[in-house]
Image (cartoon, rainbow, N blue to C red):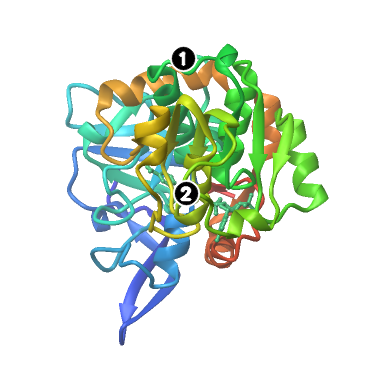
Amino acid sequence: MTGERTFKALVVDKVDGKIVHEIKQLTVNDLPPEDVLIKVDYSTVNYKEGLGFAGRSKIFRQFPMVPGLDLSGTVVESESPDYKPGDQVILNGWSVGERYWGGYAQMARIKSDFLIPLPKGMDTKKAMAIGTVGYTAMLCVMTLEEAGIKPESGPVIVTGAAGGVGSNAVAILAKLGYEVTALTAQGQESMQEFLKELGAKSFAGGKEWSEMPRPLETQKWMGAVDTVGTIVLSRVLSEMSYGGCVAACGLAGGPDLPTTVMPFILRGVSLRGVDSVWCPTSRRKAAWERLVTDIPDSALAKINKVIKLEEVPRYTKDILLGKVQGHLVVDVNA
Ligand code: NDP
């Protein structure tokens, strides 16, 4: 591929301590010197990019930076024996879009160790319709399964259910036959309709979710996927049934966890952390293989909204304000 041909990229920089962004025309020679050159089809917008564009939490570790923590596309050139031109690939995590240039560009050079082949039965659009949020939701479900929580074990709750990870978790758990309760802080009817269509059987909400629970509340859930943290996770823990498991992956409400040891020592509840960024490749591949079948296309069509590269900055603001329902896919070639 000639280094002269230009392509579009959304580049962020830090000027006078502030994050600024611009759509730029780059050439392949501008890309970092990694071993696989990819023609990007799709990327996504996540909570993390919301934090990064707002200049919070030091998400971007070097400047200039092409953000976009995931991407799907086709290999154009490869110095790695693992990939050849024409191979379709997925990338997410590994600090891409934070330390390494990511998916908000029509071309990307990526370390081959970070890539996985697109599983059979999935195309590049579906891969990013699932995105890091769907893959994280799958890791949460696998975590519950590993703790022995099966559909017949009892009800499960998903917090932050209207968000990207939450809505995917609702859809996957419902497809697998779990009885899912969705917790949405906003609780609007339109949100409930959306979550019902994804398979939620019932809803939790109300003012008790913003109050500290007692150390042990009535036992309600055998499994939980928590994307919110803080006192929402405290209440989930206090409402877990004997032997239940919580898969905790997010901090949309805050990073603190005011709780007691009571659910752990009196009800044998377990709290398992889920990380998608440094997840080993074998587990990553297993999660992506399962996503070919374990999330219905009908659910993905409801969860996703496709936007252009130029629209990304605006949506990063909305995502922090909790105004985005579901998940944003970026068509970098639109
Ligand atoms: P979204 O913004 O799409 O969704 C978050 C949801 O959380 C919102 O839709 C809202 O849902 C709920 N929420 C937001 N603020 C509050 C609050 N103050 N109190 C209660 N609920 C709140 O984010 P994502 O789904 O993309 O990510 C969710 C979390 O998971 C984030 O913290 C993200 O950083 C983390 N994450 C972690 C990963 C990992 O590897 N561990 C990977 C991907 C994401 P509702 O209106 O339904 O309550």
In the rendered image, residue 240, in percent from the top left (x then y), is placed at: 51, 33
Q: Is residue 26 above or below residue 237?
A: below
Q: Secondary structure at mark 1?
A: loop
Comparing marks 1 and 2, which lies closer to the viewer?
A: 2
Q: Which residue is mark 1?
A: 120
In the rendered image, residue 101, in percent from the top left (x then y), is placed at: 30, 53
Residue at disc 1, CB closer than 8 Å to ligand 1: no
Q: Is residue 276 above or below residue 316?
A: above
> 10 Å neighbourhood of mark 2: few (<14), some, or many (≥20)?
many
Front in this rendered view, residue 166 or 85 = 166
Q: Which residue is mark 2?
A: 234
Who's the residue at 70% across and 54% down the image?
206
Specify the quadrant of the image occupied by residue 80: top left
Front in this rendered view, residue 223 or 191 = 223
Q: Is residue 130 above or below residue 188?
A: above
Q: Is residue 151 above or below residue 255?
A: above
Who's the residue at 59% across and 12% down the image?
152
In the rendered image, residue 278, in percent from the top left (x then y), is placed at: 26, 38
Front in this rendered view, residue 54 or 224 = 224
Question: Would residue 162 be found to the left or right of residue 261 on screen?
Answer: right
Hey, what amino acid is under mark 1?
Lys
Which image quadrant: the N terminus?
A: top left
Tags 1 and 2 in contact by the CB under 8 Å rule?
no
